[in-house]
Amino acid sequence: MVLNINPDIVCAIISRAKEFFAKEEVAFPNDPEDADQNDDWYFALFEDFKDDLTFTELQTSIADLEPDQQAALVALLWIGRGDFDAKEWDDAFNQAKESWNKRTADYLLSKPLLPSYLEEGLEQLGYHCDQ
C-alpha cells in the first residue's frame, strides 16, 4: 500500500480543518450525516466564508495538491468514514482517482466531519498526527 501523500501534509490539513470547523460562525446542518448525503448546504458555507483566511488557506492548500494527493485525501476520508476499510486502500484510492475533478477540495470541505474522518483514516493505515 502506497499512501500517495505525505502523512505530515494530511496532519497539517487536519489541524487547519479543525481550526476552521471549530469556529462558532460555521453552521452545520442539524444532522452531519445528512450533510454527507446532501452537499447543497456547503455552497452557502463557501459563500459565507470566502473572505475567511483560515477557510481560504485550507481550500487553497488542498486545491494546490497534485490530483493523486487529492485522491489520497478522498480515499482517507472514505476509509475514516467507513465506506472502505484499510485493506481496501487501493480500491478506495483508485475510485477517488477516477472521481477526481477540479472541485475535489470543495467536496472535502463540504464534510463537516472531515478532520475526524481523515484522522481515523490515517490511524487505520497506521499513521498518527502529533497534535
Image (cartoon, rainbow, N blue to C red):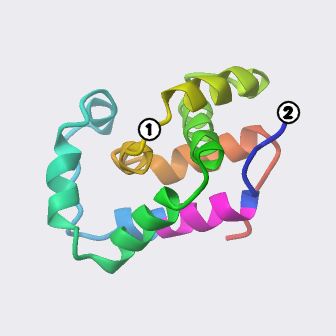
Report, in whole angstroms, how far the alpha carbon at label 1 lies from the one at label 2: 23 Å
Question: Please, is residue 95 above or below residue 105 in the view?
Answer: above
Residue 114 percent location from the top left of the image: 46, 48
Percent coordinates x, y for residue 8 in the rendering: 73, 64
Q: Is residue 63 visible?
A: yes
**How many other residues sit within 10 Å of disc 1, few (<14), some (14-19) or many (≥20)?**
few
SS for dot 2:
loop
In the rendered view, does 65 fall on the left or right side of 124? Answer: left
Q: Determine the image quadrant of residue 102.
A: top left
**Region in magenta:** 8-16
- At a point 35% along the width and 69% down the height, the residue shown is 55
Please give the residue where the numbered disc 2 appears in the rendered image: 1
The answer to which quarter of the image holds residue 41 is top left
Residue hosting label 1: 101
Q: Nearer the viewer, mark 1 or mark 2?
A: 1
Mark 1: which amino acid? Asn
Residue depicted at x 65% and y 41%: 121
112 on left or right of 63: left
* Magenta stretch: dominant secondary structure: helix
Q: Quadrant of residue 50?
A: bottom left
* Whole-percent x, y for residue 122 in the image: 70, 46
Examine the structure image and report whether residue 60 is included in the region drawn in magenta.
no
Disc 1 is placed on an element classified as loop
| Viewer-proximal residue among 112 and 67 | 67
In the displayed structure, does residue 112 sit left or right of residue 26? Answer: right
- Residue at the spot x=42%, y=73% of the render? 57
Query: Can residue 18 be seen here?
Result: no
Left or right of 128? Residue 13 is left
- Of residues 118 and 68, the one drawn nearer to the viewer in this rendering: 68
**Relative depth, front residue between 121 and 70:** 70
Q: Which residue is drawn at 43% across and 46% down?
A: 108
